[in-house]
């Protein structure tokens, strides 16, 4: 438990210290998200994915529309989930402009769940992305996300469980030069999230919370509303 507290404190300091230099606070935005996953019967393969509608404001000014899905594999006698997938991202411009840019993305990912004590659920997610961004050179990116879910009224994340949710995700660019004499930092961004969830059934959870996304020169708060569906 002490180790877990240390990790959380360290991530809070990282988000508000190292990455928060030269930031400016923008208006509150909102992300609306649906996550799904399933495993085919009697085999170790499955599918997972998500749809995310992101707004520069609460609703109406589209920041991004993200569509992502992948084929999953669970090695025998483990709870590790491996995924290879594809994503398409349409990005808008803040304000009244209808101009957009497009990105196609291939990714590989590993999910490593872990339980600490009676009710602390950790998941480590490692993701490697190959990015084909419009008007940019080919890019890659490494991501690490630590998820922590803690049921409040039960010991398991089962039907009627109310739980707190935390995650912190760090993004590292694989290259600095992205074309046309443009350069980005290796440290791409950090996302810090705090939320509250409810298990409607054993396979459906709803969640809402606050996320702060910080880059080298901007910092923006986001409301997040998500539905998590296992079938």
Image: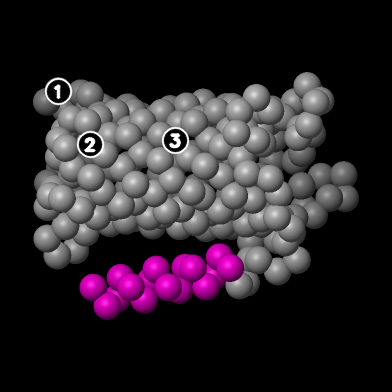
Of callouts 2 and 3, the N-terminal one: 2
Q: Is residue 12 magenta?
A: yes
CA separation in Å, label 1 and label 3: 30 Å
Q: How far apart are labels 1 and 2 at the CA level?
A: 24 Å
Q: Is residue 143 left or right of residue 4?
A: right
Q: Are there few (<14), some (14-19), or many (20+) residues within 10 Å of tag 3?
A: some
Viewer-side label of 1, 2:
2
Residue located 70% across and 55% down the image: 25
Q: Which mark is residue 41?
A: 1
Q: Residue under circle 3? A: 225
Q: CA distance from mark 2 to mark 3?
A: 14 Å
Q: Confirm or deny contact between disc 1 and disc 3 (CB under 8 A).
A: no
At mark 2, the secondary structure is strand
Identify the residue at horizontal 49%, vertical 68% (top origin): 12
Q: Position of residue 227 (x, y in %)?
A: 36, 31
Q: In the image, residue 160 lies at what x, y percent?
A: 16, 37
Residue bearing mark 2: 199
Q: Secondary structure at mark 3?
A: strand
Query: Which span is picked out in magenta?
Result: 1-16
Say if 2 sits above or below 76 in the image.
below
Question: As displayed, is residue 218 above or below residue 100?
Answer: below
Image quadrant where one finds the N terminus:
bottom left
Instruction: Tell me which residue sits at (28%, 34%) in the image.
Output: 205
User: Which mark is first along the chain, 3 or 1?
Assistant: 1
Q: Quadrant of the C terminus?
A: top left
Comparing 84 with 201, the one in front is 201
Q: Is residue 108 above or below residue 40?
A: below
Q: Give the percent coordinates (x, y) of residue 119.
A: 16, 57
Q: Is residue 7 magenta?
A: yes
First along the sequence among labels 1 and 2 = 1
Per the picture, the main secondary structure of the magenta-coloured stretch is helix
Q: Is residue 211 left or right of residue 96?
A: left
């Amino acid at each position: 438990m002490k180790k877990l507290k240390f990790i959380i404190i360290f991530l809070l300091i990282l988000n508000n210290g190292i990455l928060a230099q030269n930031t400016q606070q923008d208006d509150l935005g909102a992300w609306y998200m649906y996550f799904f996953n399933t495993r085919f019967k009697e085999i170790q393969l499955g599918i997972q994915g998500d749809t995310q509608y992101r707004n520069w404001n609460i609703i109406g000014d589209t920041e991004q529309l993200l569509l992502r899905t992948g084929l999953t594999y669970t090695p025998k006698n483990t709870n590790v989930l491996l995924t290879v997938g594809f994503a398409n991202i349409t990005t808008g411009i803040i304000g009244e402009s209808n101009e957009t840019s497009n990105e196609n993305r291939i990714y590989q990912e590993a999910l490593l769940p872990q339980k600490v004590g009676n009710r602390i659920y950790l998941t480590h997610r490692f993701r490697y992305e190959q990015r084909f961004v419009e008007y940019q050179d080919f890019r890659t990116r490494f991501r690490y996300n630590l998820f922590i879910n803690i049921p409040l009224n039960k010991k398991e994340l089962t039907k009627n469980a109310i739980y707190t949710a935390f995650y912190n995700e760090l993004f590292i660019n694989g290259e600095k030069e992205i074309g046309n004499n443009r350069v980005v930092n290796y440290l791409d961004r950090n996302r810090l999230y705090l939320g509250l969830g409810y298990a409607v059934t054993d396979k459906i959870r709803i969640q809402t919370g606050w996320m702060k996304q910080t880059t080298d020169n901007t910092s923006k708060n986001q409301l997040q509303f998500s539905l998590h569906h296992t079938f």
